[in-house]
Image: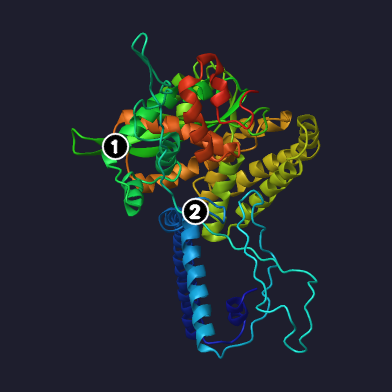
C-alpha cells in the first residue's frame, strides 16, 4: 500500500490529499522527462566515444607516419645505430672535445710528463714499412756518479704517418741498333697497354678509377690533387681515361655477372639515381639494380650492379634470364613476375623487423616491443649458427628457430584480432603475415639467408656516394659506372685492396688471352672459382 492510500484511510483533509497527489504526479512526469533526456545523452556519449576511438586510431597512425618521415628526413633511415652519415656528426663532437682538452691543458700549470697508457690501442699493421729512429742519451755516463751506463732494455713506441699521392715518372729507354749489312734497325717492342700510347701508367689509371667509383670523388677533385703537386691533369683527359677503362673492363664485369647467375641463391635490391636529361635541361629517374651472391653459399662473394633507366620488373627478368633459384628481395611488386615463372621467393626478416622498430620508436608500442623480442631470438640463433657448417646450421634452425617461428605466427594471428586494422600495428602485423611463407622458407635449408642485409650493405656506399656526384651524365655513363663498381665492389667483398687489384689487372689485361680471363677477376685466388 502506497502513501496516498494510507492517508485516504485517515481523517486527512481531502483537499490536501488532492494537492499531494497532484504534486506526486508532477514529480513522476519530471523523472520520466529526465530519464528520456538521460537516454538521449547516453546515446550521444556512445557516439562521441566511437568517434573518439576512431580519432585515437587515426592520431596514432599519423603519429607513426610522421615519426617515420622525420627519421628519414632528419635522422637515420635504418634502425642500426651506425652509419657513415652519423659518423660525420660524431667526428665533429670528437674534434671539439679534443680541442677543449688541448685548451684546458694550455691554461693549466705545466705538469711532469708521465707515460701514457696505450690500453685498447689497436696495433699497427705489421706489413707496413718501418723507418727506425734510435734516440741515444746525450752521455753514456751517469749524471749522478759518473759511472758507465749499462743497457737493460729499450722502450719502443710507434707513430703512424702517411705520404700523400706521390706522382712519379716511368722512363722507358729502348736503344735502337742498326745492321750495316742490310740497313735494318732493331729495338725492343713497345708492350701493349690498356690505352696505347697514353700518358697514364696502370697505377695512375687505377688511382683515378678508384677515386671516382670507390671514393666517389668527382673528377675535378683528382684534378686539384694533382695540381697541388704541379702535375697538370685536365679533367677532359681524366674523363677520356675513364671512358676507355670502362670499355677495357667490361668483359670482366660481364664474366662476374655470368658467374653470379650460376649461384643457387641471390639477393636483389635497387636504388634510385638521377640521370642528366640534356634535351629537357633537367634530370630524370634511373635505377641501379644490385645483385649479390648469398654469403652462406660456397665460393667467393660477388656483387653485380646493373644500371637501367627504370624500375620495371622487366629489368630484373632481363638480367636473370633463365636463372631459377632462391631470390631474396623486399616486397617490391616488380619481382612478382619472377616468382610466377619458377623463381623461389625469400622474404627479408629485417624488413618485417623494421616496421615494428619504427612503430616502437614512434610510440613505444608494447606489441611492437614483443615482436622485436621474438625476432631478436631468431637472430640470436643465426648468430650462434654463423660459424657452423650447412648441415649443423640446418639442424639448429629446425631445433630452435622453427618453434620460435611457430609461436610468432600464432601470436601475430592473435594480435591481429586485437588491434585496429588500419593502425600502424595492424599494418605491421599484416605485412608479416602476408609474406609468412617466404619468411620461414630459410629454416628448411642450411644455406638460405634470413634477410636481405647483405645486398643492402653492399649498395649503401653507392647510395651515400651519389650525394657527391649528384647524377649520371648519360645512360652509357651509368652503365660504365655500374661495370667498374661491380669490379671494385667485388674486390672489397673479397678483402682485396681495390687500388692494388686494379693496378695489377691493368698491367696484365692487354696480354691476357680470353680463355684466362678468370685469372683477372677480383677473387683471393682467381684461378679457382
Closer to viewer: mark 2 or mark 1? 1
The residue at the far bottom in this view is 109
**Left-right relation of 129 to 92:** right
**Left-right relation of 472 to 494:** left
Which residue occupies the foreground of this view, 215 or 388?
215
Which residue occupies the foreground of this view, 300 or 82?
300
Query: Would you say residue 70 is visible in this rendering?
Result: yes
- Label 2 Cα crowd, 10 Å radius (few <14 / some 14-19 / many 20+): few
Which residue occupies the foreground of this view, 454 or 60?
454
Name which quarter of the figure residue 366 lies in.
bottom right
What residue sits 78% from the left and 33% below the top?
389
What residue sits 54% from the left and 42% below the top?
457
What residue sits 51% from the left and 23% below the top?
257
User: Secondary structure beneath disc 1?
Assistant: helix
What residue sits 37% from the left and 27% below the top?
195
**Left-right relation of 328 to 284:** right
Name which quarter of the figure residue 151 lies in.
bottom right
**Circle 2 sits on which residue?**
84
Say which quadrant the C terminus sits in. Answer: top right
How many numbered discs? 2
The image position of residue 506, as x and y in percent, is 47, 30
Query: Would you say residue 452 is visible in this rendering?
Result: no
CA gap, disc 2 and disc 1: 31 Å
Q: Is residue 193 above or below residue 8?
A: above
The dot on residue 237 is 1
Amino acid at each position: 500500500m502506497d502513501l496516498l492510500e494510507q492517508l485516504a484511510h485517515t481523517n486527512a483533509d481531502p483537499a490536501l490529499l488532492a494537492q499531494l497527489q497532484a504534486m506526486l504526479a508532477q514529480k513522476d512526469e519530471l523523472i520520466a522527462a529526465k530519464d528520456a533526456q538521460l537516454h538521449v545523452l547516453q546515446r550521444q556519449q556512445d557516439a562521441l566515444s566511437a568517434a573518439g576511438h576512431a580519432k585515437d586510431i587515426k592520431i596514432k597512425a599519423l603519429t607513426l607516419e610522421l615519426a617515420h618521415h622525420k627519421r628519414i628526413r632528419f635522422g637515420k633511415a635504418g634502425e642500426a645505430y651506425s652509419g657513415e652519415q652519423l659518423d660525420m656528426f660524431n667526428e665533429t663532437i670528437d674534434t671539439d672535445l679534443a680541442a677543449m682538452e688541448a685548451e684546458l691543458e694550455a691554461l693549466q700549470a705545466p705538469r711532469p710528463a708521465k707515460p701514457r697508457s696505450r690500453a685498447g690501442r689497436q696495433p699497427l699493421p705489421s706489413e707496413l714499412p718501418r723507418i727506425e729512429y734510435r734516440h741515444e742519451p746525450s752521455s753514456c755516463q751517469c749524471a749522478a756518479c759518473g759511472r758507465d751506463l749499462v743497457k737493460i732494455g729499450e722502450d719502443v713506441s710507434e707513430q703512424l704517418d702517411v705520404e700523400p699521392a706521390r706522382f712519379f715518372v716511368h722512363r722507358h729507354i729502348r736503344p735502337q741498333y742498326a745492321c750495316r749489312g742490310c740497313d735494318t734497325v732493331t729495338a725492343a717492342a713497345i708492350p701493349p697497354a690498356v690505352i696505347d700510347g697514353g700518358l697514364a701508367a696502370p697505377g695512375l689509371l687505377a688511382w683515378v678509377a678508384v677515386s671516382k667509383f670507390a671514393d666517389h670523388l668527382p673528377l675535378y677533385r683528382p684534378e686539384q690533387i694533382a695540381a697541388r703537386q704541379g702535375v697538370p691533369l685536365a679533367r677532359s683527359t681524366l674523363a677520356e681515361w675513364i671512358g676507355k677503362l670502362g670499355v677495357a673492363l667490361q668483359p670482366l664485369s660481364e664474366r662476374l655477372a655470368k658467374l653470379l647467375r650460376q649461384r643457387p641463391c641471390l639477393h636483389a635490391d635497387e636504388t634510385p639515381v638521377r640521370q642528366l636529361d640534356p634535351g629537357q635541361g633537367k634530370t630524370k629517374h634511373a635505377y641501379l639494380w644490385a645483385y649479390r651472391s648469398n654469403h652462406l653459399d660456397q665460393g667467393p662473394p660477388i656483387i653485380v650492379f646493373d644500371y637501367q633507366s627504370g624500375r620495371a620488373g622487366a629489368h630484373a627478368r632481363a638480367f636473370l634470364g633463365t636463372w631459377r633459384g632462391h631470390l631474396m628481395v623486399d616486397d617490391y611488386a616488380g619481382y612478382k613476375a619472377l616468382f610466377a615463372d619458377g623463381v623461389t621467393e625469400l622474404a627479408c626478416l629485417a624488413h618485417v623487423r623494421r616496421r615494428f622498430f619504427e612503430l616502437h620508436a614512434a610510440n613505444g608500442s608494447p606489441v611492437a616491443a614483443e615482436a622485436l623480442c621474438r625476432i631478436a631470438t631468431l637472430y640470436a640463433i643465426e648468430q650462434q649458427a654463423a660459424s657452423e657448417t650447412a648441415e649443423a646450421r640446418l639442424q639448429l634452425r629446425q631445433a630452435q628457430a622453427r618453434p620460435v617461428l611457430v609461436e610468432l605466427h600464432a601470436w601475430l594471428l592473435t594480435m591481429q584480432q586485437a588491434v585496429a586494422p588500419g593502425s600502424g600495428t595492424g599494418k605491421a602485423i599484416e605485412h608479416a603475415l602476408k609474406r609468412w611463407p617466404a619468411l620461414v622458407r630459410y629454416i628448411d635449408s642450411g644455406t638460405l639467408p634470413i634477410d636481405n642485409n647483405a645486398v643492402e650493405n653492399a649498395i649503401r656506399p653507392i647510395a651515400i656516394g651519389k650525394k657527391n656526384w649528384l647524377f649520371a651524365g648519360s645512360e652509357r655513363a651509368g652503365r660504365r659506372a655500374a661495370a667498374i663498381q661491380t669490379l671494385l665492389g667485388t674486390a672489397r667483398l673479397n678483402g682485396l685492396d681495390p687500388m692494388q687489384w686494379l693496378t695489377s689487372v691493368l698491367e696484365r689485361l692487354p696480354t691476357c688471352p680470353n680463355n684466362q680471363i678468370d685469372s683477372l677477376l677480383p677473387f683471393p685466388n682467381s684461378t679457382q672459382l
